[in-house]
Amino acid sequence: MAPAADVYIQATGTDPDIQAQAVIEEAHRKVLEGLAALTGSEPAAETGTAFAGQLRDLLTATDQTLYAAASGAAETRLLVRALRAAADAIGRQADALTAATDEGEHSGAVRLLEGMLTVHAAMERAVLLPALAALPGVDLSALAGDFTTVLEGGRLEDPAIVDVREIPHGQRHPRIFTRFARLAAQESFVLVNNHDPKPLRREFEATHPGRFTWEYVESGPDRWQVRITRVG
């Protein structure tokens, strides 16, 4: 029998996945609350810039943790592509809000951004988070912890070598794509595998075309090492 501290009732407030979802939803709530505070206010570069920074922190944390993990699975790859496109549009609308100079333009930008954020958060809550919780190898509770770390301006531990040989096959790709998402331009990591990771390369080509390089450091027969670098 599991220790008392490890016992929880699935799909209730004691379920780690439910708790993780609550952490992420609270971050969205705070951003929407910050946007609501701008409703009816006079255009002001200082307040608009402050909100845009808060929003971009949320988008960055989401991209580097939740989207990164989901982008490595065939089941959620297209969903992540759509969510990233929507996040880019939200970022552009935040820029429009910051640049607004008259009350009508400012008010319209706030309303449009509120609608975009509400729909985006609903998609993540209703589709992305349940899909992540169901993916093999994804620990939603750990992702929520990483999400909070990035959101608060912290830096995640980023190993230079990602050795997946002891990880079950179905759980490898989410971990690799999560690591890639944390790379800055020209940064790299070395993947260590017990077979030639050609299927992984095809996934990278599908999800990150033109944004990575793939360099074999060692090619079998028992171990393969590949340096994966983010470009652009």
Image (spheres, grey):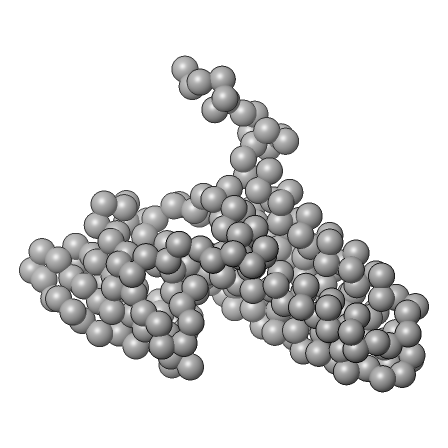
> Is 219 on the left-hand or right-hand side of 63?
left
Residue 37 appears in which quarter of the rendering?
bottom right
Residue at the image position 44 percent from the left and 18 percent from the top = 3
Residue at the image position 9 percent from the left and 62 percent from the top = 220
Residue 204 appears in which quarter of the rendering?
bottom left
> Is 23 on the left-hand or right-hand side of 143?
right
Residue 187 visible (yes or no): yes
- Residue 164 in percent (x, y) is at 26, 52
Residue at the image position 47 percent from the left and 24 percent from the top = 6
Q: Is residue 64 above or below residue 2?
A: below
> Is 167 on the left-hand or right-hand side of 135?
left
Q: Is residue 129 above or below residue 15?
A: below
- Along the line of sight, which residue is nearer the eye, 126 or 117? 117
In what quadrant of the picture does the C terminus appear?
bottom left
- Along the line of sight, which residue is nearer the eye, 183 or 152? 152
- Along the line of sight, which residue is nearer the eye, 176 or 81? 176
In what quadrant of the picture does the N terminus appear?
top left
- Along the line of sight, which residue is nearer the eye, 148 or 202? 148
- Residue 206 in percent (x, y) is at 39, 72
Residue at the image position 55 percent from the left and 39 percent from the top = 17
